[in-house]
Amino acid sequence: MDFDQAFERVIGHEGGYVNDPRDPGGETKYGISRRAYPGEDIAGMTLARAGELYRRDYWVPAGCDQVPDALRFELFDAAVNAGVRAAIRMLQVAAGADADGVLGPQTLRRVAMMDPAAALRRLQGARLDAYTRAKAWPTFGAGWVRRVARNMMEVA
């Protein structure tokens, strides 16, 4: 999966404009939040601009091009949903690597040695486990679980 395919799929999770006062990100459109991007026009955010931000701030820093194809979307989606370092820690937990949030050679070696389908299941399990410990779990946990469940159902 390449970035464009992953972006199209992740936008299906993120949706349009929302301004939920319970959301720590605040005003959000296409998953781009006021908290993370205070200088952006959130209400006027275009899909093209969201794509630029997603590639620059999530796909590339999470190392999505460095992991096996089977893991690219899940790692990207986790980075968008929980942050890059958290997503990398989830990948590291799945691979049995030191969970320091930095995608380095040890993690990449361990991931490369895994069966791709097993690695994907383990990454999804690590995501779910991490989400249950998040402070915002009581408010957003059901949505996070549905997001991972949809990912699991879309995998052939």
Image: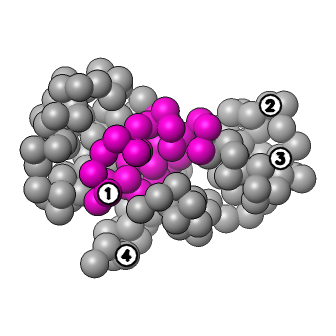
Percent x, y for residue 131? 37, 45
Among numbered discs 3 and 4, the one appearing first in the sequence: 3
> What's the amino acid at mark 2?
Pro
- CA separation, marks 2 and 4? 33 Å
Q: Is residue 139 visible?
A: yes
Which numbered marker is on residue 154? 4
Which residue does the numbered mark 3 point to in the structure image? 42
Q: Residue at x 59, y 36 (%)?
A: 57
- CA separation, marks 2 and 3? 9 Å
Which residue does the numbered mark 2 point to in the structure image? 38
Find the magenta span and give its range. 55-84
Q: Secondary structure at mark 3?
A: loop
- CA separation, marks 3 and 4? 29 Å
> What's the amino acid at mark 4?
Glu
Q: Nearer the viewer, mark 2 or mark 4?
A: 4
How many residues crowd mark 4 within 10 Å: few (<14), some (14–19), many (20+)?
few
> What's the amino acid at mark 1?
Asp
Which residue does the numbered mark 1 point to in the structure image? 69
* 27 relative position to 85: left or right: right
Q: Residue at x 29, y 60 (%)?
A: 70
- CA separation, marks 1 and 2? 33 Å
